[in-house]
Image: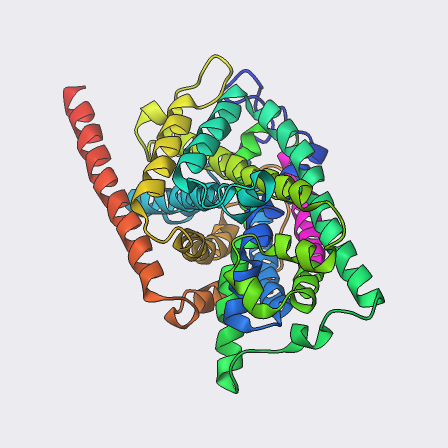
Amino acid sequence: MSTAEPTRPSDDGLRRVISRPMLTFFIIGDILGAGIYSLTGEVGGDVGGAIWASFLVAFALAFLTAFAYMELVTKYPQAAGGALYCDRAFGLKFLSFLVTFAIMASGVTSATFAASRVGGDYFTGLFGVENPPMVLIGIVAILLVAAVNLWGVAESVRVNVVITCIELAGLLFIIGVGIVVLGGGDGDPSQAFTFSGTGFGVVTGVLSGAATAFYAFLGFEDSVNLAEETDEPSRAFPPAMITGLVLAGVVYLLVAFTAAMTVPLDVLTESSGPLLEVVRVGAPDLPVGEIFSAVSIIAVSNTMLINMLMASRLLYGMAKRDVLPGVFGRLSPRRTPWVSIAFTTAVSIVLLFFVDDLGDLSDTTVLLLTAVFLLVNISALYLRRDPVDHPHFRAPTALLVLGAVVSLIFLLPMVREASIYVLALWLLVGGVVLWAVNWAFLRRSTAGA
């Protein structure tokens, strides 16, 4: 029987300062972020006006996989999340390293994509600057997020709570616009039920749109990396995850329908600030464009903050398991993993310069995490043979199997372009190089001892 230290003292490593309400807001805030504010139009480009259908399929994948994470985080409430679970299940350091790198890369690519959207149409809507310097604005945003991350996890999560309320208010405003438009007899509700393509093309369109929309649901899996900083994690995580996902799912479906029936599809698909188009078309007489642009920038920035929190805690957790060099486990006087924060910040800034199509970063994030979700569902099944000495959530076996099958389907090439696989492959190649360096370093250290 193994143990998982469900109530580790607060002076041993990271500080256990996150309460259940704070965790719930963290998950809601991570889900309600850059995805819905930036990608609604791109989803429409894949599926047509039936944007809600792709969001519904994406919600199903997220909801299924959440059960595996709920079982594993309550069973092993430690930092490192999916990488830790795969390490426990398979015991292969190389695989554990690749999973660690894939999750870290997904967090950094997600944050970089969000940073690129800070300087997009929402920035123009707020400041009136045409063609703003997106890379420069993105770098400033990433550095500000790093500063908050270094400040402390409790402070970061409190900032997230405030931002979550703001971004939720923004989405509820969009839904309100939709109600007003429908009530006035305007809009085109039929567009929300129009699919692109015919026959099997409808299915591939929905799945392609879902692969893009799934980015908007990412966040529940980030939270498990904060297990060592959460009070009573075995009791806090299941209700927090379910609440976050269900609330996000309902809001997303309503926003998707509102956008599709309010804005012409060609306008929606061309905008990097699609929800701003809803405000312009559905409420042209209200002077709220600048305010909503500010809300959208705040929401996108929150996605950056939470993804970088996750990535840094992941590196810290795996350094403690000797999967990464020990330097990533170093803590600042405020008990934050400063080396991990510095590393992930540097990688994010580099991606801003070297990725030609920054829109590919969201799809790459989804691809990497879908592969991780497949392994996490399998790990949850395999680790059933490893009992622990404290109560934990147990997911229905059928849901774990179904989660693995759906993840496998979402990995198929028919749902995304080849360039996404190429970018993901290059990131993993970088991971292999880093693993080789780490292996050589550990071997030299062992020989010296």
Q: Quadrant of residue 137?
A: top left
Which residue, as the protein is rendered here, is positioned at the far right?
A: 183
Horizontally, residue 430 falls left or right of residue 281, namely left
Relative to 67, 1 lies left or right? left
The location of residue 229, given as percent across then percent down, is 57, 28
- In the rendered image, residue 258, in percent from the top left (x then y), is placed at 70, 63
- How many marks can you see? 0
Residue 73 image position (x, y, % from top left): 56, 42
Residue appearing at x 52%, y 86% in the figure: 198
Residue at image coords 36%, 26%: 328
Q: Is residue 299 left or right of residue 384?
A: right
Quadrant in which the C terminus appears: top left
Residue 41 appears in the picture as rendered: yes
Q: Residue furthest top?
A: 333
**Which image quarter: residue 367?**
bottom left
Residue 135 lies, with reference to residue 147, above or below; the image says: below
Question: Do we see residue 27 in this rendering?
Answer: no
- Residue 28 lies, with reference to residue 406, above or below; the image says above
The residue that appears at 61% across and 72% down in the rendered structure is 49
Q: Nearer the viewer, residue 160 or 357?
A: 357
Q: What is the span of residues highlighted in magenta in the rendered image?
A: 233-251
Position in image of residue 388 (x %, y %)? 55, 40
Q: Give left or right: position of 354 versus 84.
A: left
Q: How is the image coloured?
A: rainbow
Q: Nearer the viewer, residue 199 or 93?
A: 199
* Most common secondary structure along the magenta stretch: helix
Q: Quadrant of residue 391?
A: top right
Q: Find out whether residue 234 is within the magenta segment.
A: yes
